[in-house]
Image: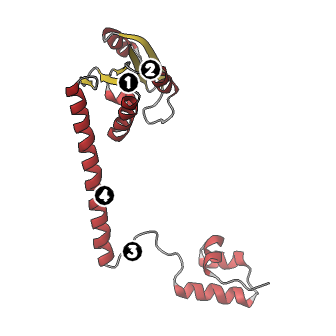
Amino acid sequence: MNIGYCRISTSDQNLDLQIQALKEAGCEKIFEEVASGAKDDRPKLKEAIEYAREGDVLVVWKLDRLSRSLKHLIESVNDLEKRGIGFRCITQQLDTTSPSGKLIFHVFGAISEFERSLIRERTAAGLKVARARGRLGGRPKVLDQEKITIAQALYDDGKTTVGKICEALNISRATFYRNVKLKAA
């Protein structure tokens, strides 16, 4: 059975074009949804996937109707495949129910994985070069040793409140407590 899923992002858009294309593609049941593609929670998509049984095919009009990114698309289609459910996209002519469609889809997946590996390598190399130049990364310290010494002295003196010390040094209470050794009670 072909099961259609169509989605629009806002209620002022129209599902008619997608519904017509899904009907022409032989979809016997169509799930319609108004939800942003950026949202993880799409109840009608979840319902369509739960409705599908082994041997069924989930059909969408365009790839972006199903997923937010290539990574999400690959994960979604792999989840369908594990359950014996095919996937077909009308406009991009992608069909995982055929051997050539599976091949093309897996090539997409391999390219995506390769791209993620390259990004990880470049990031690691960039961090290594930065460390070699003395850059440690992360957020800069708010307090240097001189300010810590001043804060400690003011606190140990007992005449200045923690609030006033924080105000004078322009730091938060959390920063104060993280850096100043408190007197034992």
Query: From the viewer's perspective, is residue 157 above or below residue 54?
Result: below
In this rendering, would 173 be left or right of 85? right
Q: CA distance from mark 2 to mark 1?
A: 7 Å
**First-in-chain label (3 vs 1):** 1
Q: CA distance from mark 4 to mark 2?
A: 36 Å
In this rendering, would 137 be left or right of 90? right
Of all residues shown, which one is farthest toward the left?
100
Query: From the viewer's perspective, is residue 21 above or below residue 112?
Result: above
Closer to the camera in the image, 37 or 171 = 37
**First-in-chain label (3 vs 2):** 2
Q: Residue 120 bears which disc, if any?
A: 4
**First-in-chain label (3 vs 4):** 4
Tell me which corner region of the image, top left, top right, bottom left or bottom right, holds residue 127.
Answer: bottom left
Query: Callout 1, which amino acid?
Result: Ile
Quarter occupied by the N terminus: top left
Q: Identify the residue position indicated by label 3 in the image.
A: 136
Q: Residue 85 bears which disc, if any?
A: 1
Q: Nearer the viewer, mark 4 or mark 2?
A: 2
Q: CA distance from mark 3 to mark 1?
A: 48 Å
Name the residue rendered at 28%, 20% in the picture: 90
Q: Residues within 10 Å of mark 4 (few under 14, many from 20)?
A: few
Q: Nearer the viewer, mark 1 or mark 4?
A: 1
Q: Residues within 10 Å of mark 2 (few under 14, many from 20)?
A: many
Query: Callout 2, which amino acid?
Result: Ala
**First-in-chain label (2 vs 1):** 2
